Amino acid sequence: MSILIKTVFAVFVIFLSIPLQAQKNTKPNVLFIAIDDINDWVGPLGGHPQAKTPNLDKFCKEGSVVFKNAVCAAPICGPSRSAVLSGFMPNNTGVYGNATNILNTPIGKTHAMLPEYFSKHGYYTLSDGKIFHKHATAHGVDFGHWAFDEHHRSRRYVKEGIKQETLYSAKGVIAGKKNPDFKAASGAKLSWASTKCDIDGTVDYKVVNWAKDKLAQSYEKPFFMAVGLIKPHLPWIVPQEFFDMYDLETIQTPALNESDLDDIINPNGKLTHKPDADYQWVKKHGLEKEATRAYLASISYADACLGVLFDALENSPYADNTIVVIWGDHGWHLGEKLRYKKNTLWSEATKTPFVIRTPDMHKMEYSDRTVSLIDIYPTLVDYCGLPDKQLDGVSITKLLSKPNSKWQRPGITVSASGTSVMGERWHYISNLSGSEELYDLDNDALEWNNLASNPEYKDIVKSMRVWVPKHTEVAERINYKKPPKYVDADADPRIKEGRDLHKLK
């Protein structure tokens, strides 16, 4: 009888312990995926009809909310990432360019960055790949490593080797041959080629394989895992198999309007914008299809890496208790507005992929609401049940259950040249040069017809102008001398020592 009693008692104790263990792991894990320089040329958004992103397509179809009108807080890497990770807009931090480090701003010194806030409230945080933008420091390089409990660095500058089809606009090399008539142009940076190595020798593949290994491990706390892909950032150098996915002869290039910039005039009657150096170089040499294919190849490469990550999550113990957030730091021009690259206030640069999956999602839904990447921080805090924190963005958790709920806020993008106010129909741009722009996205999705000076639309301009920030901070710009081997230098170990989570807001 005593043995029976002991057995019953033991079972009873185990039974009582189950809720406690479950309670310990009730908070969801977070898989936070950043993709560099990616525009809407992905299957779920349909930005390019020939784009091949089967892994992202499958992931989204199996359960997600895809935000069709998501904008970045800033249209260039460093400021965009600083905004997402701090929760504050560039006009409040003063971070407008890649040379300014969020750590040197008053907000950066006093507020916990997104992963720090999760560490502070019981999460184990870890990362690999590009999450923060890197900066030189007094004692090495700041990779954002200090913001995580565990940081791994898959080396970016691997000796992949390139084949002869490389093209460099900065050096005038076309198909491996230097153009004898080439004259260097300021700001020209386009380059593409295929690697001599296979995908498993590339850095983004190494990053997702690190994440794959980490998703197979056990954790005592819920985790916040940040995974950053570098492609499709320049240079567009990826394995040949991804170029082979696209037939050069049938590649469709974006629709262009050579007089597109003529109706954007500043108060002095001068054009606000002109074609950039890369656009002129591509046009001169008839390389539109080559450039388009190279960007598409880089997106398909990134998608292949995402496939490794998605499969790893699906086969892990965490598939049913992880919120997945996929975001691009900003968009990219492929000739539209007579330019390549980023850092403009037009839709091509301000709009970016933004996808969220929660464990209870089992189908793909689209949200037409205009949201911002600045909303990621408060949304994750809200969804994961962390203490409220006053931030510039707002939680969009209600859009995760009802993607097209009523929503009044436009998406604001702030750059060193002005402000973009994106609505579902109207897109307003206030340039610091004094010129204004207004586009009717329902009838002019390519933004070719600037309506800002038309009296018929003065009330719309006035209603959107109120969202332009009235006050802007200017951050102190600290330029450290870069280490002799900056491209492969080690992380500065001293930064984390000065980050006291107990004191950070």
Image (cartoon, rainbow, N blue to C red):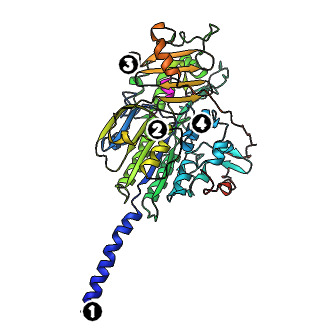
Q: Provide residue 377's location: percent of width, then percent of height.
A: 50, 44
Is label 2 or label 1 in front?
1
Residue designated by label 2:
240
The residue nearer to you, when weighing 402 against 316, is 402
- Give residue 56's quadrant in the image: top left
Residue designated by label 4:
79
Which image quarter is the N terminus in? Answer: bottom left
- Sequence-first tag of 4 and 1: 1
Is label 3 or label 1 in front?
1
Q: Judge whether residue 452 is colored magenta.
A: no
Residue kind at label 2, given as amino acid type: Gln
Disc 4 secondary structure class:
helix
Q: Are marks 2 and 3 in contact (CB under 8 Å)?
A: no
- Which residue is painted at 39% across and 59% down in the image? 26
Residue designated by label 3:
442
Q: Is residue 265 left or right of residue 140?
A: left
Residue kind at label 4, given as amino acid type: Pro
Mark number for residue 324?
Answer: none
Disc 1 secondary structure class:
helix
- Which residue is painted at 41% across and 35% down in the image? 244
Residue designated by label 1:
2
- Sequence-first tag of 2 and 3: 2
